Image (cartoon, helix red, strand yellow):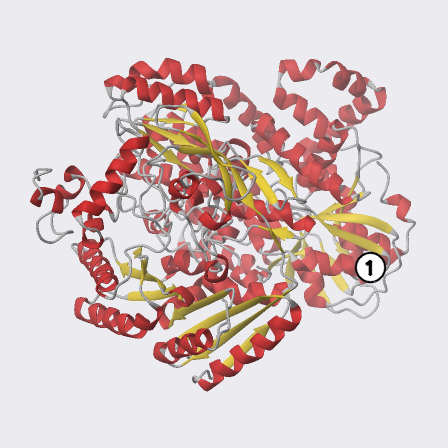
Amino acid sequence: MTDSDTAPGAGEGSRSFDDLLGDCVHCGFCLPTCPTYVLWGEEMDSPRGRIHLMGQMREDDVLSEAAAGHFDNCLGCLACVSSCPSGVAYDALIESTRATVEQEHRRPAGERLLRAAVFALFPYRRRLELMRGPLKAYQASGLNRLVRRTGVLERISPSLATMERIAPPLTGAVPALPEVVPARGRRRAVVGMLTGCVQGAFFPQVNTATARVLASEGCDVVIPREQGCCGALSAHTGRAAEAAGFARATAAAFADAGVDAVVVNSAGCGGTMKHYGRVLEEAGAAPEEVRRAEELSARVVDLSEYLVQLGPRAPRHPLPVRAAYHDACHLSHGQGVTSQPRELLRAIPELEVADLPNPEICCGSAGVYNLLRPQAAGDLGERKSEDVRSTGAELLVAGNPGCSLQIASAMDRAGEPISVAHTAQVLDASIRGLDPAVLLTR
Amino acid sequence: MFDEGEGEPRMPQPLTALIPRLREICGDDGVITDRTRRRTYESDGLTYHASTPGVVVLPTTTDQVAAVVRLCADAGVPFVPRGAGTGLSAGALPHSEGVLIVTSRMRRILEIDVANERAVVQPGVANLEVTRAAAPHGYYYAPDPSSQQVCSVGGNIAENSGGAHCLKYGFTVNHVLGLEIVTPQGEVVRLGGKAADAPGYDLLGAFVGSEGTLGIATEITVRLLRAPQKVRTLLAAFETMDAGGAAVSAIISAGVLPAAVEMMDALSIEAAEAAVACDYPPGAGAVLIVELDGPAADVDAQFERATRLCRESGAFEVRTADDAAERARIWKGRKSAFAAVGRISPAYIVQDGVVPRTALPDVLRRIAELSAASGIRVANVFHAGDGNLHPLVLFDDAEPGASERAAEVSGRILDLCIEHGGSITGEHGVGVDKACQMPEMFSPADLETMDLFRSAFDPAGIANPEKLLPTPRLCGERPGVRKGVHPLVAEGAAEQF
């Protein structure tokens, strides 16, 4: 599974839900790769069980409370899509099912409030940026250490406690990126770049590293100002109309940018943007609009995928660091991108790259899952941190910011903090010949 | 919240009374009562048979299993054991008025004892996990069913599972040293032990393959084998199945004992290509996978002979694999074949029969004739070395009458196996699916003896009832599947209604 052309779910848009359901032959090959089955060992919380529940939902024409809960328990990591020998498009099935759950299921008041808060905040970069000031002050005051030591927040709300723990350490202001970063040396391509919502507000350094690496490799990097959230968080949570709105806006932002490719450095965003057609179809958009969105999707590539296609030009400097690479689910299972990041990292002199045991199992971050299901996410984070520890790595590299935060937080709780970096930051440090200490800051 | 399930059918009465006790034993989250959840357990890997279990329990310890079984015994309620639910004979088909005991939470590896070459595991541990745990020490667990990354060791015990490599290494029964079991009365008993060959009757051997009718294995001691010094695999492509079959006979009669000899026909190759792009030689009417393992010098010599014999039998392309990655590429198509058939057919039946190796070409020709006459496509995947056929009978379940015609073809294939002196199952077990075909293979006296044996363990008949041995209710309810008068009816021992 390294070829993005065969990325799961592609071309499933035209088939009906019942048709897609019928592809499952109940063989159970998905069970050992499903994070909730690994945790709980229950059929209803396995992909095979959830597909059965979807079948029941269609057959009885009713969505039971029990089934809705098991759909909500799914992390949407898509490991089952990779392990399915029958090619069941679970990604399309669960997205559509989530939309049904959103429409037909009334959640308890507390959870409704939490979801409303999450979706009023996360997809909006400016709102997130407003949070930076208070968050920075909170972190600088040392209050965060007191809060964690006493566990007071854990008792009030495990979701808030998770949010507190995974909030990234913030320094300085968000540096503004120019609308065009010109290629260094002879130009090889013109590419667009998605800055994203959470990435843009909380990980601006990943975006600047991405732009620098692309420019160093000979790309003019076009960064349209009017872009916002790509809609992935909403699409993965069944908020179909909201997701379609974000998808339209993003497609419009890049439509006339004159770029050969749209480079994305966040796995979840790239995975969704490659299936904009499906996102719009789910929301009942007109065929013409779906077609335009598909045109954009065809140009979407993950950063690592693009850099491997392009081939390296900028010289790499040594980075004597022992790193471990973590496969973000929406990169490996969602887009079939596993070899490219490893190839890029292994080409850096003196950088040791270890593979994690159980690479197919999700770390528990899964978009906003760790906020909605803090207990399960925490348990998965713990498992992943044990695997990371077993490699003896001092730096954890991933292609998705959520994973890095989740794993760093789990390692912190276990009393063995680890430095985390995005693939782009490691490449950037190597190309610029920086001291590896800049990556080992935590 | 939804404890009594929504709507019909409600939980049967005797069971409702057991629920509070089951919760005390397994904890609240170890007992599943609501109907929506229970229904997800309605079938194992053979969805053709489905029945919603009365209640589902998820124990984590031997004591919990024993307490649940004692409760069932006292109340006269049937119980059905289930592992990962990958079985292909409906051996874990739930009882609608019984307790389904699922071992999926009993998945701890208790001991890897390298010096004594054995491992102790709980029944819910996946087959491949045993090998993963032993691999760092240079050891592995030999039985390797195609579903090895999913299927549980407990389920392997129940079905006496084989796998591609059982030609050389034998079935599960050859690799189990000891068991802790819970009997149908709820007693915890040990069979066998850590030492080889315990004196007295071989109860361990009898338990392995008993399909959950003699109790539940709760702790399993298996043999670990040293990973072979060298493994070499070849893939040979032939224009016809006959040529492939001739190669198999030539290899075995030359005294070469491969670890595995597997064959796939054109249709199953097509499915595997669609599923995992295994990139087998184009235009092949049959591919043969031959794997040799053992001491390096030995393997190299035998490998050359096997390669030569394939070419002499008409192979138009032979590929070889010398490392794990190349080997995985060759095996990828074969290992995914069953599930991959989902790519080329909306529904299918995986059949499992055995014939003497020499009868293979004739049986395959007869299967092709059956397929042509009925219009039902049949793909063939099989462990060619030991004559274990896995015909995949393809049909469209949306087409009226198609599933019945497919079942008919599938049953006729078993008739062919019996006619040729073979067996109705090589490794998937009898379960519900083939219980009614047992009388075609065994005489009434044979079956009665088996029933007496079963009753010695389970006089009340509550352990996985209506599996393995034919019952009047089971076989009477499915007219057309069995031909002639039921042997028990002929004996006057039963009535059919």
Q: Could you tell me which quadrant the C terminus of chain A lies in?
A: top right
Q: Is residue A151 above or below residue B82?
A: above
User: Can residue A265 be seen by looking at this rendering?
Assistant: no
Label 1: chain letter: A
Residue B425: percent from left, percent from top = 31, 54
Side of B124 relative to B16 (left or right): right
Q: In this rendering, would A266 be left or right of B473?
A: right
Could you tell me which residue is drawn at 15 percent across and 45 percent down?
B478
- Badge 1 marks a residue whose secondary structure is loop
At 62% from the left and 46% from the top, the residue drawn is B117
Q: Position of residue A382 (x, y in %)?
A: 67, 32
Residue that numbered label 1 is attached to: A348
The amino acid at mark 1 is Ile
- For residue B228, which quarter of the picture? bottom right
Q: Residues within 10 Å of mark 1 (few under 14, many from 20)?
A: many
Which residue of the protein is positioned furthest toward the right in this rendering? A435
Percent from the top left, x then y, of residue A29? 46, 48
Image quarter of the N terminus of chain A:
bottom right
Q: Is A284 left or right of A180, judged from the image as shown?
A: left
> Is there any visible trace of residue A195 in the rendered image?
yes
